[in-house]
């Protein structure tokens, strides 16, 4: 085979399964967008060429992204380690720039307009840069990730763009940064943190479900009983009592003060309402400090759980076999808001039913497991950390997006990877995947 | 280094696996185990438009349409789309003000929500329709919708046909499984109500796809789930328009009722109740204007007296009383009774109009002379029949006969809210007379001559004539002979009208005697002056005393004598003798039916009769008084309950009279064969009864009865 070294390195070691899955996802995505946009009275083939519809735009995005992908595969894998810090810094600067030149799209100032009517969301790109910079930091020989100090530095790197996102009113994007916990955990973050995080999450959910005062009393009672039952052992070791006491006080504080404070003072009214509606409760917006300022304004027409309701109806009405391609009435009647982007899963669920959604979710599962397998076969820490970051980001997006469409998670605006309409998100995920593929192709090398 | 922590990859895989499993679990629960989402989606997106079929037509026996459908237009609106309406112009056309416009809009929204079509102004006049079509472009959201309304070319039979009206909340609750919706029209009374499901037809449904803004996007699934509207089926009745019109004409200016039955089939040829109303008054936009005054009218024009009016049958009951005794074998046609002007076997004498010896020498003669004593005696024999041990059991048996004759029970005619009138229960007498062992036939003696607490509707009276005409059987009276393209359900519905109701075991020889007696009534008896040109006929007059005023004039008859084809009952309230007013009306109706035309002489008689004004003074006074008072129409009433409301009134009207006084007052059947001026006679009766009351007040104070007097 007469091939140039360049071509050789391009095809050699690139994981074919991931590439196939990647294009399959994009094809499914375009199909879903087509279902949403389809109008029986219009001529879809002519509008496809004209590029006026979302699905035709998405096709152009996909073609563009393929070129980007090929371009990334042609790069030297050392480029990524070399540029990680610079890119991260540039990303943060771009995010800061949005506060000055940001364009308001859907109530968030996180967009920067670029040529041709397209807009760029730096927070999206920052996910890539954060993944790179985290990988670079952890893979540095002088970093000992078992030490608390380096763990804190890593958390700080992640937290910075997250905080900036919150300031841009992009709660969803900010939450995505928590996905890096996978990578950090893999590299030695004590498992206790996962346990504590999980317990804390349960505590918060319990606070929503049970009256805070009642819950506080339950917690107190449990602590007292615990101390009484272990009283002999505690006599020997006084510090343990202190530990129990501090856990109790944290729990108590969370339940009684922190959570109500979060809902009333930090979250916007609509966010609190969404979260409360997840557990089937109604949030009283008059308690909310932020809404108090805008109290005089007239209320929105549709109830806050309208989206989720319609989305559940759409998916539920699909039944086992689905209503058929282009036959979903929820989709045709445009009952689900944001169905192109955040709620794209509904068009799939309605048209192809459980068979469709199950197959689709399994496809994603296979994709994630494939990525983990790739991650584990890396020789260099940089590649592994980066790979786990990709796994985390993908997993977080998939889990949260699908969960919110089926009513398992509050509505936060994050897209379904590779499926949702939108150039920014498609580009981000493409870059994430192809950098990983590029690193994987050099998995025998140790990259620093 | 790579191996370090490598087990954590597995844990991460596990976490991912668990989360995905939870998601799949929720998908299973959403997509497989709950079907409410499918419904919710359909409710969201599928807009069902109901296509109304034409209602069925009702024909008379000669296939003349008693009612038809005509097209009317409604101005309808979808509130959500009514933006930028030139309200001033619209209000100008409809002649309403801005306030009324807003009020109606709110009403439409309350009734049908913002996104559905609601009626803004129903039943547009042709001029209004023309004006609106021209200007419709100025009123976005408004449109004109076609609807078919009833039209009555013969202006007749309002009570029988009933009317169609918009359903109300009450109706919807009662018929919640029948698929009615707000704004639908349904039969509310009469045949329209009784045969609603036949006349209504089958509504078609067109399904459209609707988007989240309520806009129609086109047919759902290319219309493959749409159903076509099936027109309502026509009803073919036994009615005769001309007889019906004649009956209504003859009852003009009177209060009363006439029922003409085809005795061979039980089919109703005519049923009139007076005062009546023109059915066109309750169709379309006329209804709003007229319903109020019709409802408040003291003469109660909406009330169908033919099936709801309860009248003491008086002497017209006598043939039936005889039938019981004959069937039980207590008497034979040759049985005679010595009457010398009064019946004395029960203590106080009961007057009879005849005193001459032999006027009750046998059944036939007694019938012709309408001898009170004879039939009181026959009644007592039936009650005190030794076969049944005591008077109570005898009475129960007698009541059983009454019920089988169709008295004291609903006949089952195909009209809603028929009244069963009254054959008193033993309970009523127990209450008055105490222990049944102390009962005897004297207590309710005047039942034997159709008084006491006995009441019957004109329909029941006509039916009892059909029973005699047929020698002991009848067909349940009905209007509908057949339904167009009868299906199994319709056949079941009509089967009860096609089965013979047998009642007695009496041979036709004995019936012949009764018929001869009733024929004699028309030859030399109480109805000798009333002739039926071209036919021999049998009849019985009745002059029923009633607690509310002057006697009711009652006449029952059938003809021709030898092969009866028609049975008639006519009641004219507070008009005096049976033969004077009800008699000629009856024979004219029979003549019209049997001969299909009236002789010149009869024609003149009919004209004269129609002009006679027998309205009670109190009602006339009411009209005079209320001419000055402008009636405000009653807005809130319930279509569905209209019939029942009237029934309740009638019952309460009947009840409050204390029992004993009634019995005493009804002690006499009046002198019926004296024709001529009725006033003086009535006075004597009043005097008589007044005297009787005075006398009886002291004497007839039986145990537990003291409170009543």
Image (cartoon, rainbow, N blue to C red):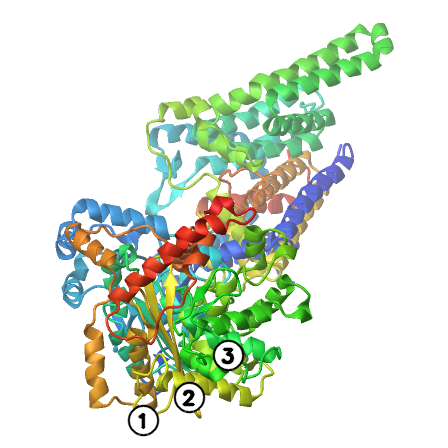
Instruction: Tell me if B293 is positioned left or right of B326 in this view.
Output: left
x, y percent for residue B181: 41, 59
Q: As rendered, which of B598 and B100 lies closer to the eye?
A: B598
Say whether mark 2 and mark 3 are on the same chain: yes
Instruction: Point out the tag, 1 or 2, that comes first from the N-terminus.
Output: 1
Mark 2: few, some, or many residues within 10 Å (few <14, many ≥20)? many
- The secondary structure type at the circle numbered 1 is loop
For image coordinates 77% across by 32% down, the residue present is B4
Dot in front, 3 or 1: 1
Numbered mark located on residue B565 in the image: 2
Pair 1/2: label in front: 1
Kindly state the secondary structure of the residue where label 3 is placed. helix
Q: Chain of mark 3?
A: B
* Label 2 residue SS: loop
User: Does residue B275 appear anywhere in the picture?
Assistant: no
Q: Is residue A42 left or right of residue B504?
A: left
| Left or right of residue A341: residue B19 | right
What is the spatial separation of the Cα atoms under label 1 and label 2, in whole angstroms? 14 Å
């Amino acid at each position: 085979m007469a091939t140039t070294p360049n071509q050789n390195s391009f095809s050699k070691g690139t994981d074919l399964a991931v590439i196939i899955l990647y294009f399959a996802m994009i094809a499914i995505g375009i199909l879903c967008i087509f279902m949403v946009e389809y109008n029986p009275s219009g001529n879809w083939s002519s509008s496809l060429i004209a590029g006026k519809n979302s699905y035709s735009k998405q096709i152009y995005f996909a073609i563009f992204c393929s070129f980007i992908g090929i371009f990334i595969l042609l790069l030297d894998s050392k480029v990524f380690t070399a540029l990680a810090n610079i890119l991260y810094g540039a990303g943060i600067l771009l995010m800061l720039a949005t506060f000055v030149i940001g364009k308001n799209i859907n109530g968030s100032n996180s967009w920067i307009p670029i040529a041709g009517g397209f807009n760029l969301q730096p927070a999206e790109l920052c996910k890539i840069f954060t993944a790179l910079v985290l990988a670079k930091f952890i893979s540095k020989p002088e970093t000992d990730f078992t030490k608390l100090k380096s763990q804190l530095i890593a958390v700080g790197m992640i937290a910075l763009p997250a905080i900036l996102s919150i300031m841009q009113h992009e709660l969803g994007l900010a939450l995505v940064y928590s996905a890096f916990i996978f990578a950090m955990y893999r590299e030695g973050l004590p498992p206790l943190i996962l346990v504590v995080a999980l317990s804390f999450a349960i505590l918060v959910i319990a606070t929503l479900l049970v009256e805070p005062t009642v819950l506080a009393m339950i917690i107190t009672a449990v602590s007292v009983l615990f101390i009484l039952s272990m009283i002999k052992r505690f006599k020997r070791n006084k510090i343990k009592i202190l530990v129990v006491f501090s856990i109790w006080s944290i729990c108590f504080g969370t339940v009684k003060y922190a959570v109500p404070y979060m809902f009333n003072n930090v979250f916007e009214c609509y966010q609190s309402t969404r979260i409360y509606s997840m557990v089937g409760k109604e949030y009283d917006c008059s308690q909310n400090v932020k809404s108090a300022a805008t109290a005089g304004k007239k209320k929105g027409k549709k109830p806050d759980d309208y989206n989720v309701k319609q989305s559940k109806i759409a998916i539920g009405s699909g039944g086992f076999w689905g209503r058929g391609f282009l036959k979903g009435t929820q989709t045709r009647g445009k009952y689900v808001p944001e169905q192109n982007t955040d709620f794209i899963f509904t068009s799939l669920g309605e048209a192809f039913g459980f068979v469709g959604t199950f197959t689709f979710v399994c496809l994603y599962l296979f994709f994630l497991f494939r990525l983990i397998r790739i991650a584990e076969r890396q020789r260099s820490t940089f590649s592994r950390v980066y790979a786990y970051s990709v796994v985390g980001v993908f997993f977080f997006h998939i889990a949260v997006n699908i969960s919110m469409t089926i009513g398992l998670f509050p509505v936060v605006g994050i897209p379904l990877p590779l499926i949702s309409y939108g150039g920014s998100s498609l580009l981000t995920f493409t870059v994430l995947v192809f950098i990983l593929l590029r690193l994987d192709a050099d998995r025998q090398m140790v990259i620093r | 280094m790579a191996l370090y922590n490598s087990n954590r990859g597995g844990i991460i895989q596990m976490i991912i696996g668990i989360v995905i499993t939870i998601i799949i679990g929720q998908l299973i629960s959403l997509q497989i185990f709950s079907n409410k989402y499918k419904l919710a989606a359909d409710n969201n997106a599928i807009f069902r438009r109901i296509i109304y079929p034409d209602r069925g037509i009702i024909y008379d026996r000669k296939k003349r349409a008693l009612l038809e459908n005509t097209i009317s237009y409604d101005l309808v609106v979808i509130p959500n789309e009514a933006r930028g309406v030139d309200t001033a112009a619209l209000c100008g056309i409809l002649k309403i003000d801005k306030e009324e416009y807003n009020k109606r809009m709110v009403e439409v929204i309350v009734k049908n929500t913002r996104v559905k079509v609601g009626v803004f102004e129903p039943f547009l006049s042709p001029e209004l329709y023309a004006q609106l079509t021209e200007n419709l472009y100025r009123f976005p959201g408004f449109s004109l919708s076609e609807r078919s309304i009833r039209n009555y070319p013969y202006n007749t039979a309002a009570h029988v046909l009933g009317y169609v009206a918009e359903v109300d909340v009450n109706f919807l609750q009662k018929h919640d499984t029948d698929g009615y919706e707000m704004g639908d029209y349904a039969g509310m009374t009469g045949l329209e109500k009784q045969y609603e499901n036949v006349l209504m037809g089958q509504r078609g449904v067109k399904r459209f796809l609707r988007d989240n803004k309520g806009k129609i996007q086109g047919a759902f699934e290319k219309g493959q789930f749409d159903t076509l509207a099936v027109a309502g089926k026509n009803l073919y009745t036994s009615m005769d328009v001309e007889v019906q019109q004649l009956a209504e004409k003859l009852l003009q200016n009177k209060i009363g009722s006439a029922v003409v039955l085809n005795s061979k089939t039980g089919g109703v040829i005519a049923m009139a109740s007076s005062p009546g109303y023109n059915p066109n008054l309750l169709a379309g936009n006329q209804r709003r204007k007229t319903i109020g005054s019709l409802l408040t009218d003291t003469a109660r024009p909406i009330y169908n007296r033919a099936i709801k009016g309860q009248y003491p049958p008086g002497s017209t009951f006598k043939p039936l009383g005889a039938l019981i005794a004959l069937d039980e074998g207590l008497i034979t046609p040759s049985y005679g009774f010595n009457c010398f002007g009064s019946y004395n076997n029960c203590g106080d004498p009961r007057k009879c109009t005849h005193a001459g010896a032999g006027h009750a020498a046998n059944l036939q003669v007694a019938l012709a002379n309408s001898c009170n004593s004879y039939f009181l005696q026959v009644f007592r024999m039936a009650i005190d029949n030794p076969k049944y041990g005591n008077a109570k059991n005898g009475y129960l048996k007698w009541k059983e006969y009454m019920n089988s004759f169709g008295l004291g029970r609903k006949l089952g005619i195909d009209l809603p809210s028929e009244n069963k009138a009254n054959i008193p229960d033993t309970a009523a007498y127990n209450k008055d007379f105490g222990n049944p062992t102390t009962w005897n036939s004297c207590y309710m003696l005047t039942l034997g001559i159709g008084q006491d607490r006995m009441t019957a509707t004109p329909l029941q009276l006509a039916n009892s004539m059909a029973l005699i005409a047929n020698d002991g059987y009848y067909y349940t009276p009905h209007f509908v002979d057949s339904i167009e393209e009868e299906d199994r359900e319709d056949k079941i519905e009509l089967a009860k009208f096609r089965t013979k109701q047998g009642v007695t075991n009496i041979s036709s020889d004995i019936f012949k005697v009764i018929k001869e007696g009733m024929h004699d009534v028309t030859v030399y008896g109480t109805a000798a002056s009333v002739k039926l040109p071209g036919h021999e006929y049998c009849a019985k007059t009745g002059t029923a005393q009633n607690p509310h005023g002057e006697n009711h004039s009652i006449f029952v008859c059938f003809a021709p004598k030898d092969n009866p084809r028609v049975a008639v009952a006519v009641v004219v309230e507070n008009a005096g003798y049976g033969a004077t007013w009800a008699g000629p009306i009856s024979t004219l109706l029979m003549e019209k039916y049997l001969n299909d035309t009236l002789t010149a002489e009869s024609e003149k008689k009919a004209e004269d009769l129609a002009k006679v004004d027998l309205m009670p003074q109190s009602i006339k006074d009411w009209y005079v008084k209320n001419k000055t008072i402008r009636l405000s129409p009653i807005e809130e009433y319930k279509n569905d309950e209209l019939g029942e409301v009237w029934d309740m009134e009638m019952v309460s009207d009947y009840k409050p009279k204390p029992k004993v006084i009634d019995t005493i007052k009804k002690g006499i059947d009046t002198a019926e064969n004296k024709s001529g001026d009725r006033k003086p006679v009535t006075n004597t009766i009043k005097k008589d009864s007044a005297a009787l009351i005075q006398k009886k007040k002291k004497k007839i104070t039986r145990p537990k009865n003291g409170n009543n007097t």
